Image (cartoon, coloured by chain):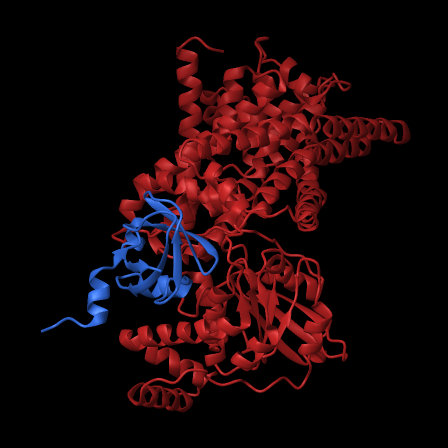
Chain colours: A red, B blue
């Protein structure tokens, strides 16, 4: 797609939960994470689309903002783009302002601010179907007259009104409506002077910069403008919106009475979480079995097809065992993402944040930190980026620093490999997994309590969160999101994991030993030699050299631990056996079992706490603006993980466990 | 000096955290360190607000939107019965 054919750039702005991302997808056909809680969109996303008149426009999805007076880093991005102050971003030619028709008064506040900036604007009146079902009667024509911008009634979810919206975005764009309110002479004079100064300084949008400068320096002017804007909205809504008399939030009220109850709410939250973890084991059993069978069948075919030798070993023991060893966890990862998306989509996540605020407050954080931490269970990177919605800088830094201790899905292959060696039955295994997640979370919260006061003095966090009404799951978006994640996982298995599997196979196979004994071959291989070097370090954890080398390899990507173990044990004699049976049967040279429950526990504890993800370190550097925090976090978490695993193993051994 | 009607009304105003659950109120004044943030999210003078729950974080609806806010923030919002 060449940028030369793009005729104009349109910025999509709106409050969080206004449906910007859904509209963005409906217009451009691109997919993006759709959340039902505040701050789902935290990074720039753009796409292109054609109007019915054949014009090609670029659409930029800006982070959700309640106002242009930013309270968090992502709101600041929106403000900066609109006043032409954002690096590497040209000022847009038109603003497409998305308004939630069910919360019109509040959303009009952002529109009236955008109007003040002097852009051509089109207002998309979204969620009109929900508004109708709530008995709200909207009059887009009256609103268009009042605000001087075209209002188009749409439903981004069902794509109703999208064609009309594209027609309204016709080129040339409508003229800017101009400021709708007037201040006292003194204020008007100050705005005029400030705008002139911005013109002299060659600011990208002098009208916007001029007004913002006045508001910034004068709290009284700011208060006056805020009140005047709301008064204008109040009058406009009297003609543009009719509300039913009765309260129609009854369903949300009834559900909230249970989910936000101080006792019942926690019971529901805990039950939901246990169900999620139990389901991850229970429902994934069959597809995982099928993948494993498929992998073995494929290995059998390759063995029949390619004669015995290094090439066969590379394909069977290196590539298929390495990639298959990770791919087998695809069903569990799909299930975890499915449940997270489902809870987001129904509106429950914001309730979970509300419940968690009390707990978070005890460790110096607020409920706002809960949503990024929760994203961290899927992947630390979007979680760290979601911290941009936290207004308080110290709270944001503390959240970034503890976030990798919420176990991401990359750890799941390791947990689900080791847990069945310790626990039997889906319920016990599910509870063990829940315990692992709980341990990571509790440690993260305790770390926040210790860290936060050491990060310097800060204003106390104020909790203010929108709780969207409960709604039916948006199945299409859930499926989109899950398939995106599944595809990303498969891609990683087919690229990074494949490459690393080949390297690991090479290190495991060469140099060749004169002996036919696979144990001797392994000891003399590069991997064996590396293992010998690090053995003194990992032996106190109860690990053997193969586990040690797998742990080192896993610093490239956590899943590689599973591949490395799979490749190491693929050369063992019992080829027909499943991986876990092989691990259970493996022994030390003195014949004692290698993978005892205590060793399993030591591995799990190490993986709960170690930060084995270089992309996370790079993102932490970007978000904190300092290598000091990023490398400090990496080193600190690795040392902590080692000490925790050491303590678990040594104390367990001292108490007589094996 | 005799009090004006606005002063008398403000004298009888409650903070949102003191207001009774289930009743409709109108916001009379928003004052405090977070007043700008509160106005931005919809807690602006003249707006109608309904308090749904009490507690450290309370729930209320403003302009049809359900919001959770801490007691510290609710203390910055003065309301009168609607």
The foreground one among A61 and A100 is A100
Which quadrant of the structure image shows residue A651? Answer: top left
Can residue A631 be spotted in the picture? no
In the figure, is residue B78 to the left or right of A158?
left
Please state the horizontal and vertical placement of residue B36, each as a whole percent of the image: 33, 66
Q: Quadrant of the N terminus of chain A?
A: bottom right
Please state the horizontal and vertical placement of residue A540, each as a whole percent of the image: 45, 21
Furthest residue to the left?
B1
Please state the horizontal and vertical placement of residue A511, each as a whole percent of the image: 68, 31
The foreground one among A35 and A396 is A35
In the figure, is residue A79 to the left or right of A156?
left
Please state the horizontal and vertical placement of residue A176, each as a whole percent of the image: 54, 85
The foreground one among B68 and A605 is B68
A214 to A46, vertically: above or below: below
Furthest residue to the front?
A245
Which quadrant of the structure image shows residue A275? Answer: top right
| Residue at the image point whose x is 24% and y is 65% from the top | B9
A209 to A480, vertically: above or below: below
Q: How many marks?
A: 0
The foreground one among A319 and A196 is A196
B13 to A587, vertically: above or below: below
| Residue at the image point whose x is 44% and y is 25% from the top | A645
Can residue A241 be spotted in the picture? yes
| Residue at the image point whose x is 52% and y is 19% from the top | A599
Furthest residue to the right?
A305
In the figure, is residue A130 to the left or right of A533?
right
In the figure, is residue A148 to the left or right of A225?
right
């Amino acid at each position: 797609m060449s940028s030369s054919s793009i005729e104009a750039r349109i910025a999509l702005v709106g409050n969080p939960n206004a449906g910007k991302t859904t509209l963005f997808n409906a217009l451009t056909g691109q997919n993006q994470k759709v959340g039902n809680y505040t701050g789902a969109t935290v990074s720039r996303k753009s796409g292109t689309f054609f109007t019915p008149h054949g014009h090609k426009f670029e659409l930029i999805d800006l982070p959700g903002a309640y106002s242009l007076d930013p309270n968090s880093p992502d709101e600041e991005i929106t403000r900066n783009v609109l006043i032409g102050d954002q690096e590497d971003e040209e000022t847009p030619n038109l603003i497409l302002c998305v308004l939630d028709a069910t919360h019109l008064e509040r959303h009009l506040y952002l529109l009236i601010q955008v109007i003040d900036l002097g852009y051509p604007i089109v207002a998309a009146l979204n969620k009109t179907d929900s508004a109708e079902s709530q008995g709200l009667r909207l009059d887009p024509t009256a609103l268009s007259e009042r605000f001087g911008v075209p209002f188009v009634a749409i439903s981004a979810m069902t794509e109703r009104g999208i064609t009309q919206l594209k027609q309204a975005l016709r080129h040339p764009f409508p003229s800017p409506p101009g400021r709708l309110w007037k201040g006292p002479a003194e204020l008007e004079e100050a705005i005029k002077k400030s705008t002139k100064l911005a013109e002299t300084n060659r600011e990208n949008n002098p009208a916007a910069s001029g007004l913002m400068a006045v508001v910034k320096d004068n709290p009284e002017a700011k208060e006056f403008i805020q009140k005047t804007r709301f008064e204008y909205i109040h009058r406009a809504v009297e003609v543009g919106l009719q509300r039913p008399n009765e309260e129609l939030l009854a369903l949300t009220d009834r559900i909230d009475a249970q989910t936000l109850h101080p006792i019942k709410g926690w019971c529901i939250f805990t039950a939901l979480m246990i169900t999620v973890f139990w389901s991850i084991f229970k429902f994934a059993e069959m597809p995982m079995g099928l993948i494993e069978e498929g992998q073995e069948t494929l290995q059998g075919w390759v063995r029949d097809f390619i004669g015995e030798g290094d090439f066969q070993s590379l394909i069977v023991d290196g590539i298929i065992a390495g990639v298959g060893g990770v791919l087998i966890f695809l069903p569990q990862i799909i299930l975890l993402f499915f449940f997270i998306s489902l809870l987001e989509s129904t509106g429950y996540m914001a309730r979970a944040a509300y419940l968690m605020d009390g707990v978070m407050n005890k460790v110096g954080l607020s409920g706002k930190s809960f949503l990024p931490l929760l994203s961290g269970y899927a992947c630390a990177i979007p979680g760290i980026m979601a911290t941009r919605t936290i207004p308080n800088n110290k709270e944001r830094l503390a959240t970034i620093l503890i976030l990798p201790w919420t176990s991401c899905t990359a750890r799941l292959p390791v947990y689900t490999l080791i847990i069945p060696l310790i626990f039997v039955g889906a319920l016990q295994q599910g509870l063990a997994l829940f315990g692992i997640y709980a341990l990571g979370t509790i440690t993260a919260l305790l770390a926040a309590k210790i860290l936060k006061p050491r990060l310097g003095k800060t204003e106390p966090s104020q909790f203010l969160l929108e709780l969207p009404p409960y709604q039916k799951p948006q199945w299409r978006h859930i499926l989109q999101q899950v398939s995106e994640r599944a595809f990303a996982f498969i891609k990683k298995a087919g690229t990074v994991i494949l490459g690393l599997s080949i390297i690991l196979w090479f290190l495991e196979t060469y140099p060749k030993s004169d002996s036919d004994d696979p144990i001797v071959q392994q000891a003399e291989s590069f991997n064996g030699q590396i293992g010998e070097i690090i053995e003194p370090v990992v032996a106190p954890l109860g690990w053997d050299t193969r586990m040690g080398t797998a742990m080192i390899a896993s610093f490239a990507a956590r899943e590689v631990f599973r591949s490395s173990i799979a490749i190491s044990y693929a050369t063992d004699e019992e080829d027909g056996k499943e991986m876990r049976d092989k691990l259970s049967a493996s022994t030390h040279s003195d014949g004692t079992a290698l993978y005892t429950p205590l060793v399993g526990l030591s591995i799990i504890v190490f993986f709960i706490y170690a930060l084995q993800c270089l992309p996370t370190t790079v993102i932490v550097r970007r978000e904190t603006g300092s290598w000091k925090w990023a490398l400090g976090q990496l080193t600190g978490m690795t040392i902590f993980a080692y000490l925790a695993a050491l303590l678990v193993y040594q104390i367990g051994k001292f108490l007589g466990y094996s | 000096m005799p009090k004006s009607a606005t002063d008398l009304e403000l004298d009888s105003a409650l903070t949102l955290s003191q207001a009774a659950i289930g009743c409709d109120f109108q916001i009379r004044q928003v004052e405090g360190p977070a007043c700008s943030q509160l106005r931005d999210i919809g807690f602006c003078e003249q707006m109608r607000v309904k308090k749904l729950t009490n507690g450290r974080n309370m729930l209320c609806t403003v302009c049809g939107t359900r919001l959770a806010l801490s007691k510290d923030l609710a203390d910055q919002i003065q309301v009168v019965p609607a």
